[in-house]
Image (cartoon, grey):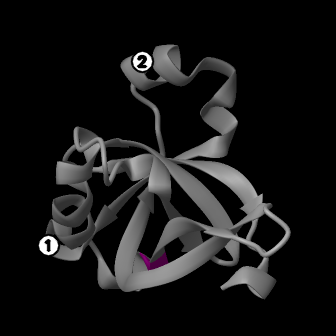
Amino acid sequence: MQLRYLNKAVLYKITKEKQPNGSYINRYNFIKMFSVQEQEISDEISVSIYGADLNRIIRIKSINSELEKHLKPKMVNESDNISKYIIVIDDLSYSIKTVKSFIDIMLVGRLENKSL
């Protein structure tokens, strides 16, 4: 991993907060900032898994696998699942698809700063 290709990735946990009128809004709680490197997905297995969504998927890897170590236990945990987390890179939010020795994330859209 070359340091000159690193980007900043911010991990947020999404919690639902009930409003006085009974509706819920998402709150994004800052967890930690990580340095990650984006990788091109080109292997045939990933292409067959993600299909048409491949254009929205990127693969990231963090220094010393810090982010992977943090997220891996959440793959099977029911109360604190990876579906409750997002990763923000360059003001774009990504949902987490899989965590192995790398992390595959899918573009969700621009992060709304009003609820941070």
Quadrant occupied by the N terminus: bottom left
Residue furthest to the right in view is: 21
> Which residue occupies the foreground of this view, 78 or 59?
78
Residue 116 location (% of width, % of height): 66, 85
Assign the magenta stretch its main secondary structure.
strand
> Which residue occupies the foreground of this view, 102 or 67?
67
Q: Residue at x 62, y 75 (%)?
A: 27
Look at label 2 and name its amino acid: Glu
Choose mark 2 or mark 1, whichever is in front: 1
Q: Does 43 appear above or below 96?
A: above
Magenta part of the chain = 6-10
Circle 2 crowding by C-alpha within 10 Å: few under 14, some 14–19, many from 20: few
| SS category of the residue bearing label 2 | helix
Look at label 1 and name its amino acid: Asn
Task: Say if mark 2 contacts mark 1, CB within 8 Å.
Answer: no
Q: Residue at x 67, y 42 (%)?
A: 56
Q: How far is the residue under mark 2 from the one under mark 1? A: 26 Å
> Which residue occupies the foreground of this view, 54 or 84?
84
Q: Does 82 appear above or below 112?
A: above
User: To which residue does mark 2 refer?
Assistant: 44
Circle 1 crowding by C-alpha within 10 Å: few under 14, some 14–19, many from 20: few
Residue 15 location (% of width, % of height): 54, 67
Q: Residue at x 47, y 39 (%)?
A: 41
User: To which residue does mark 1 refer?
Assistant: 64
Residue furthest to the top in view is: 48
Residue 3 location (% of width, % of height): 32, 83
Name the quadrant containing residue 65: bottom left
